[in-house]
Amino acid sequence: MTDVNQQTAYDNNNIFAKMLDGDIPYYKVYEDDKTLAFMDIMPQAEGHVLVIPKQKAVDLTDLEPEYAAAVLMTSKKVMQAQRQVFEREGVIQMQLNGSQAGQTVFHYHVHLIPSSIHELGRHAVTQADNNDLADIAQKLAAVIDA
């Protein structure tokens, strides 16, 4: 039986840590001193963005309050941009804590998906076209910077 009080330790080699270190390329939507928002390369719908803190945190229980607030503010900016770019009101905001909940990258992150829960594709199944991701990232970033 799994110990429910045992939490996954932060892995400095996880893909998001490598992105923050500049070791792995990504399609940036927005960045500030505490957060980074980028396109999910395995999107569940067109325009799927991930927002991460620049703090080493596996899940919500590890996150310092100032980073939690920063993630929410960045998420708000990205959602407003998604609504404008995709001309839709509905954006799924999803955050998974622990492998039993479906978390696959153990660095805290929020999924922002301009879609309906009833139309949502499966997670981490199909990789998006890099040109499409770059185009969408540029459109979203332009709205945020406007």
Image (tube, rainbow, N blue to C red):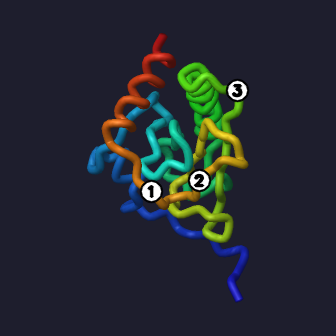
Q: Assess disc 1: are there few (<14), some (14-19) or many (≥20) residues with their C-alpha within 10 Å of its C-alpha.
A: few
* Tag 2 residue: 121
Q: Assess disc 2: are there few (<14), some (14-19) or many (≥20) residues with their C-alpha within 10 Å of its C-alpha.
A: some
Label 1 and label 2: CA atoms lie apart by: 9 Å
Q: Residue at x 43, y 23 (%)?
A: 139
Q: Nearer the viewer, residue 118 or 144?
A: 118
Contact (Cβ within 8 Å) of mark 3 with mark 1 = no
Residue furthest toward the front?
119
Q: Amino acid at mark 1?
A: Thr
SS class, disc 3: loop
Residue furthest toward the top?
146
Task: Tell whether 112 sits left or right of 32.
Answer: right
Label 3 and label 1: CA atoms lie apart by: 25 Å
Q: Residue at x 40, y 53 (%)?
A: 127
Q: Nearer the viewer, residue 60 or 133?
A: 133
Q: Residue at x 59, y 36 (%)?
A: 71
Numbered label attached to residue 89: 3
Task: Tell whether 120 sits left or right of 141.
Answer: right
* Tag 1 residue: 126
Q: Position of residue 67 (x, y in %)?
A: 59, 39
Contact (Cβ within 8 Å) of mark 3 with mark 2 = no
